[in-house]
Amino acid sequence: MAGQMNITDQLSHLMRGVDTVVPETELADRLAEGRPLRVKLGLDPTAPSVTLGWAVVLRKLRHFQELGHTAVLIVGDFTAQVGDPSGKSETRKRLSAEEVRGYAERLLDQFSKVLLPEPLEVRYNSEWLGGLDMAEVLELTSKVTVAQMLERDDFRKRFDGQQPISVMEFMYPLLQGYDSVAVEADVELGGADQLWNLMMGRVLQERFGQRAQMVMTMPLLIGTDGEQKMSQSIGNYIGVTDEPSDMFGKVMSIPDALMRQYFELATEVGVGEIVSAMEGLVSGDVHPGDLKRRLGREIVELYHPGAGIAAESAFDQVFRQGGVPDDIDEFALDDNPDQWLPAVMTEAGLTASNGEARRMIRQGAVKVDGDKIDTEDVLRSAIAGRVLQVGKRRFVRLGP
RNA sequence: GCCGGGAUGCCCGAGCGGUCAAAGGGAGCAGACUGUAAAUCUGCCGGCUACGCCUUCGGAGGUUCAAAUCCUCCUCCCGGCACCA
């Protein structure tokens, strides 16, 4: 598909959903050079899953690959141990080398769900950052002033809010910028919160005698809570490895107002189609429930090809009809003919403590084969082989 | 180094000798409702087969019949001043 597209078409493909481009008009010039651009994306392995939020940027990287450009994926194994202060209101706890290595392995696997295998260059930034000596580090630090650092909102806020900022955190943008020098990036991608860091790459490349990279940022995808950006530490995320029905359900839980953003950033549905769907929503021709189902299917299909419809019906089975999912865990009961239900629930992992289990029973949240249970003491024969359910989402099949 | 402020449950934040398992908010969970795991309303929200008991208020000691609340030391954070460059 790359060869046949003219520059205008390429531009519109690449500019879809983009938040900021610096410098604004340079992309057309670079594309016109007709060579594969080196498009850098750096991700720090600080958490075990790739979320749809990361996938927004990864998809953009893929768009470049589709046009024949080289994806330079930088695994920030070194920088992960420094900790990106962007948007953080407090010092990030430092990760150990083992944690980082473990995350990196799991992430690489997940990246392949989004990126094409070619043209792809995967680099670990410890490769060049790990070997810098003190003189080189000092050289790097001489490029930027403390006042410039404090211009950053997140640093400023922490400073004003009496939160600690370590000097090491000041290093982070410099290291990330140095990555761009090391891989000679033409373009660097990132989330909107990365803009300042990405700009540092431009500054440093010029200091090191290279042409300054372009910077493209993608909007931050709002998480399932509809409030904050999608993040693993907040827990409002959808992971690309989530089970289809789970993924579908999480999509269904987002506020309606977020649908447009999700269609634009998290699917490949055409822009024109999205616009008309939104118009239909306003005029009443399109039912929000139906549209959100479509969104759910589209997203599931991207990560579990062919599983969209099944995920939807599994969702219906459990949440619309109050049914039981097909594959649930088993829990073996002991032989005692009299069973104390709270203990069973806790041992089966349905509740965190006996106290919580008793509360659930009191609140009418506990069912056996769909029938509400209101007593704590039950006969083994009354529950064996049946499905024990807490709330809408927690199930366990009791052993015979 | 000196002076002062601070550290409370998942998070924010009241409390400032007993009536504190600790107000309030947020998050979370459950019930009702719903196109929806949204919104709203209601309830729950340290542990313990539990009108009682146990473990919690940065850490370690101490005072007291009794401490999250008072004292001592320590750790960390913030601010100011000083010092060094």
Image (spheres, rainbow, N blue to C red):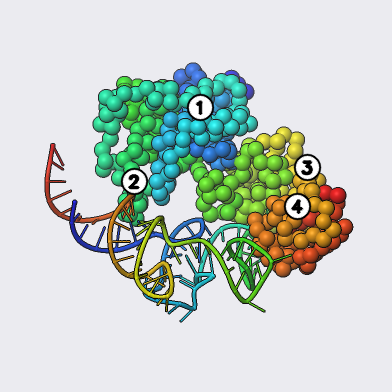
Disc 4 from disc 2: Cα separation:
45 Å
- The residue carrying mark 2 is A165
Q: Chain of mark 1?
A: A
Q: Residue furthest right?
A: A381
Quarter-wise, where is residue B39 in the image?
A: bottom right
Q: Residue furthest top?
A: A35
Asked if the residues shown at circle 4 and circle 2 are in contact, with their CB atoms under 8 angstroms apart, the answer is no
Whichever of callouts 2 and 1 sits on the residue coming sooner in the sequence is: 1
- The residue carrying mark 3 is A310
Three-letter code for the amino acid on which mark 4 is drawn: Phe
- Residue A41 in view, yes or no: no
Disc 1 from disc 3: Cα separation:
33 Å
Q: Chain of mark 4?
A: A
Residue A73 shows which numbered tag?
1
Disc 4 from disc 3: Cα separation:
20 Å
Disc 4 from disc 1: Cα separation:
40 Å
Disc 3 from disc 2: Cα separation:
48 Å
